[in-house]
Image (cartoon, grey):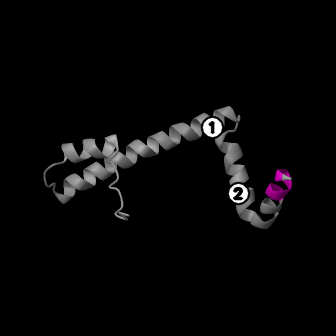
Amino acid sequence: MDATPQPRRLTNAQALLLNLFDRDLSEAELTDIRQVLTRHFAKKAEDEAERIMKAKVQSARTIEQDTKAINENRTSYRQRLRSDKS
C-alpha cells in the first residue's frame, strides 16, 4: 500500500499568480502586491457586511450600540445568547 500523500492541485488563483510572478520581485513590489490584495479582500468583506446589515435592517449605529453593550458586560450577553438558542 502506497502511503505517499497525493499532491494538492493548485487553485486557479494560485496558478495565475505563479504565472504572473515568475520572476523575483523587490521588497517594495511585494509590499505593493500585499497592499493590493489586502484592499481587495477588505472591500469584499465590507461589501458582504453591508449586504448582511441591509438584510437584517441594521445600521452602523445599532451595531456600535450592540458592540458597546457586549463589551460592557460580556457575561450577561453570553447568557442572553444561550437563552435565545434554547
Tell me the tag on residue 52.
1
Q: Is residue 7 shown left or right of residue 61?
A: left
Q: At 79% from the left edge and 55% from the top edge, which residue is drawn?
A: 81
**Quarter of the figure with the N terminus:** bottom left
Q: Is residue 26 shown left or right of residue 1?
A: left
For badge 2, the amino acid type reads Lys
Residue 72: quarter of image: bottom right
Secondary structure under tag 1 reads: helix
Residue lying furthest front: 1
Tell me the tag on residue 68.
2
Up/down of 41 relative to 57, above or below: below
Q: Nearer the viewer, residue 62 or 10?
A: 10
For badge 1, the amino acid type reads Ile
Q: Which of disc 1 and disc 2 is earlier in sequence?
A: 1
Up/down of 70 relative to 40, above or below: below
Cα–Cα span, label 2 and label 1: 20 Å
Residue lying furthest left: 23
**Magenta segment:** 80-85
Q: At 86% from the left edge and 53% from the top edge, which residue is drawn?
A: 86
Q: Nearer the viewer, residue 20 or 81?
A: 20
